[in-house]
Amino acid sequence: MALSDLKVKTAKPTEKNYKLADEKGLHLLVKSAGGKYWRFKYRINGKEKLMALGVYPDTSLALARSKRDEARALLANGIDPMDNKHAVKAAHEAAITNSFEIVANEWLKKRGQKSEGNDQRLHKLLHKDLFPWLGNRPIDQITPKELLETLRRIEERGAIETAQRAKQYAGLIYRYAVATGRVERDISADLRGALKTTKTKHFASITNPKEVAKLLIAIDQYTGTPVVHAALKLSPLLFCRPGELRNLEWSEVNWAEGYIEIPAHKMKMGQPHIIPLCRQAIEILRDLQPITARSIYVFPSARGASRPLSENGVRTALRNIGYTNEEMTPHGFRAMARTILDEVLEVPVEWIEQQLAHSVKDANGRAYNRTKHLKQRREMMQRWGDYLDELKVFAS
């Protein structure tokens, strides 16, 4: 006779375990300790097996029968329901282990820390734009169409450049997944040309010598902290990338040789870079050293010496001396130097490009190394420092 809900509910434990039979191989095992367990007995390949279907009352009589019927349907197709259950569980665990988020976090750990600002933007992009849609998906089951739909969501809010960056990072994650045997190929390659592109945006810069003189005088009159003031004064003299300046460490300053050497892992092009120091730059660094020497950073953050100056430090200083973001940016000092060194001081372009740490090659197609034209670049940097001083003198 089939069981009823009332009979299952009122079944009491006895000194020994006992069974209450239902139908089609299903029974309730009532244990002496008080637990009630659903079991399904079946035969396959001549062997009798017993499959657990759940614990009462979490698994009701109706649910237990439904699970039994699912198992019987598998048996009808020659599939062992217990083997199928184990296979489904293993597939689920594998899917969790190989989810996009798990693989991405492995890649992040292997990638290591770069600059503070870039790391923060990358983590924000992953958690805001990729993980919510792809994070729990097995990385080998994500289709190019699914990735494109995720990137389109970023585009739809007008963040065209962010969508392009998200595609690039997804590609790096997939290439790591290929290397670790999780996927066969990088599916982001299928999306070439599928996203919108933006026109090249040039950083605002001042390149007219008369206006440069006014800017330099305003910089000298800045009344902020010594750290920010020094960073602001060194920006035109060194004309390196803003991130390279604010992450500069005292160990990278070679006083004996009179230059800064930035290691490869901190450079955009992945190559070590030398910045010869003119007399004016050395004086600024010497004046700053007693103030920040306890920090590893030349320009430590006001929030703590263990981290570098905020990426908005110099930008905010420019705003404070009266220059809008449309007039001048920290990155604009590079365009300033590039233009005037070429058009006014008539310095050979290859020296300028080498000092800007651009990817330049010689006539034989070989990339310049960090010491290429170093003697000429030393002379150029001193000439540049002297020229900036002359601009201020003639403007006053």
Image (cartoon, rainbow, N blue to C red):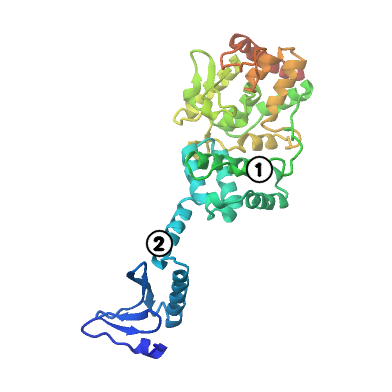
Q: Which type of secondary structure does the marked residue at label 2 adopt?
A: helix
| Residue 64 located left or right of residue 147 | left
Picture residue at 54% right of the left edge, 29% below the top: 266
Give the residue number, with chain letter if any, for mark 1: 190
Dots 1, 2 in contact, CB < 8 A = no
Picture residue at 54% right of the left edge, 17% below the top: 259
Picture residue at 71% right of the left edge, 49% below the top: 155
In the rendered structure, which amino acid carries the disc numbered 2? His
Whether residue 165 is visible, yes or no, is no
Sequence-first disc among 1 and 2: 2
Give the residue number, with chain letter if any, for mark 2: 86
Q: Quadrant of the C terminus?
A: top right
Would you place residue 300 above or below residue 164 in this image? Answer: above
Q: Nearer the viewer, residue 371 or 80?
A: 80
Measured as percent of width and height from the top left, residue 294 is found at: 44, 30
Q: Which type of secondary structure does the marked residue at label 1 adopt?
A: helix
Picture residue at 56% right of the left edge, 14% below the top: 371
In the rendered structure, which amino acid carries the disc numbered 1? Asp
Measured as percent of width and height from the top left, residue 10 is found at: 34, 89
Local crowd size for mark 2, using a 10 Å CA cut-off: few (<14), some (14–19), many (≥20):
few
Q: Nearer the viewer, residue 68 or 256?
A: 68
Measured as percent of width and height from the top left, residue 224 is found at: 61, 34
Which quadrant of the view contains residue 334? top right
